[in-house]
Every structure is written in structure tokens, then in C-alpha cells.
Image (cartoon, rainbow, N blue to C red):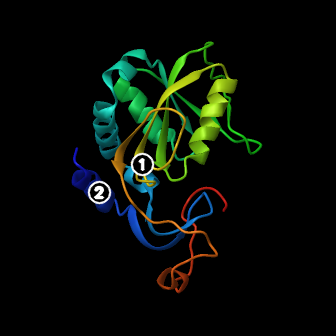
Amino acid sequence: MTDDEVLAEFRAAEALLEGHFILSSGLRSPRYLQCARVLMNPVRSERLARALAAKIPTHVKAEVTAVVAPAMGGLICGYELARALGVDSMFVERPTGTFELRRGFRLAPGQPVLLMEDVVTTGLSSREAIAAVAAAGGRVIHAASLVDRSNGKADLGVPFTPLIRLDVPSYQPDDLPPELAAIPAVKPGSRAA
């Protein structure tokens, strides 16, 4: 799948938004990719996950035994990637503010895991999820996402394969360009800023 084809999927789902957005990291951006909208169609979700699975290195696909994704944003894409890879799907969640593996999910000591995100901006939540996998005994050997908003700048501490890399500017709230500052900010994501 080419970058243009991936973006066409987001546009078809009305998931590529323009305006003034507050990201879960607290940064501000003039564009927002609403993965929940692009993933609400099962056929589209499967198509995107299969395209991503094709990009993941063969040696990773041979070693990984589970996909773990952070709730909420990573649930559907994590499940679909696990299905495409033929491995188990699990998720970490933040019942008290810190990611943890719950709901009876277990990882064997050293179990090789792929971490799946919907969108990576700074990499902070990915690193937190990787730490939760390690605390549960697993070992994240690779990470993946539908979208890398950092355009390759985020360091997750493990090799990383996104379906698409985008150079979408983001700004500190107190350092906005005038055209963005003139637009009211909205928070379309699932976490409070």
C-alpha cells in the first residue's frame, strides 16, 4: 500500500481532520488523524493491518508470539495486526494512570512481543507500554503503528515500523503560529490533555 493509498483510506473515512487540535501529548497541531474513524470499518481495518504486516521484517514475524497494544487507541489495530500475523492479541490499560497488563493476560518470561499503536507522535505512550510489557515479563522486540506523526523522530527504544510516516507539525501550547492560535482548540482524542 502506498502512502497515497493509506491517506486515501483516512480521507474516505473522514479521519484526516484540519483545524487546531490538542494531542494526547499536550502538543498542538493543525492536522489530526482520527484512527478510530478509519478503524470503524472492519474491511478497511483488515486491509490496513495486512499492509502493515507486509512491511514488518520477516525475522520479526517469525519470532513474535503476541501483539500488545495500549488501550484505547491501539485495541482494534492491535487485534487486526495480531490476526494478520497469526498470533495472540493483548492490551495494556491505565486503570490508575500507569499502563499494566490485566484481564487475565499473561506473558511468559522473555516472551517476544510486538507493540502496536495507532499513532505515534512523541513515543511517550509507546515507551510506557513497552515498560508495562517488561514488567509483565515480556520482551518487546519491535513496535509498529498505523501512523508515525513524528516522521521518524520518535525514539521507542526498539525497531519501529509504521504503515505511513507523516511530517505533521506540532507545537507547544505557548508557542503557536498566529494562524493556529486564531482557531479555537479542540481535543478529539480519548485522553484528557
Can residue 183 be seen here? The reply is yes
Horizontal side, residue 140 vs residue 104: left or right? left
Q: Quadrant of the rendered structure where residue 175 is?
A: bottom right
Tell me the amino acid under the disc marked 2.
Leu
Q: Earlier in the sequence, mark 1 or mark 2?
A: 2
Q: Is residue 90 depicted above or below 145 in this figure? A: above
Q: Quadrant of the N terminus?
A: top left
Residue drawn at x 61%, y 57% as measured from the top left: 25
Q: Secondary structure at mark 2?
A: helix
Residues under labels 1 and 2: Cα distance?
A: 17 Å
Badge 2, how many Cα within 10 Å: few under 14, some, many 20+?
some
Horizontal side, residue 138 vs residue 79: left or right? right
Q: Quadrant of the C terminus?
A: bottom right
Residue position marked by numbered label 2 in the rendering: 7
Q: Secondary structure at mark 1?
A: loop
Q: Position of residue 164 (x, y in %)?
A: 34, 48
Residue drawn at x 53%, y 47% as measured from the top left: 73
Badge 1, how many Cα within 10 Å: few under 14, some, many 20+?
some
Residue drawn at x 31%, y 22% as measured from the top left: 58
Q: Position of residue 69 (x, y in %)?
A: 53, 36
Residue position marked by numbered label 1 in the rendering: 152
Residue drawn at x 60%, y 33% as measured from the top left: 130
Q: Position of residue 114 (x, y in %)?
A: 48, 28
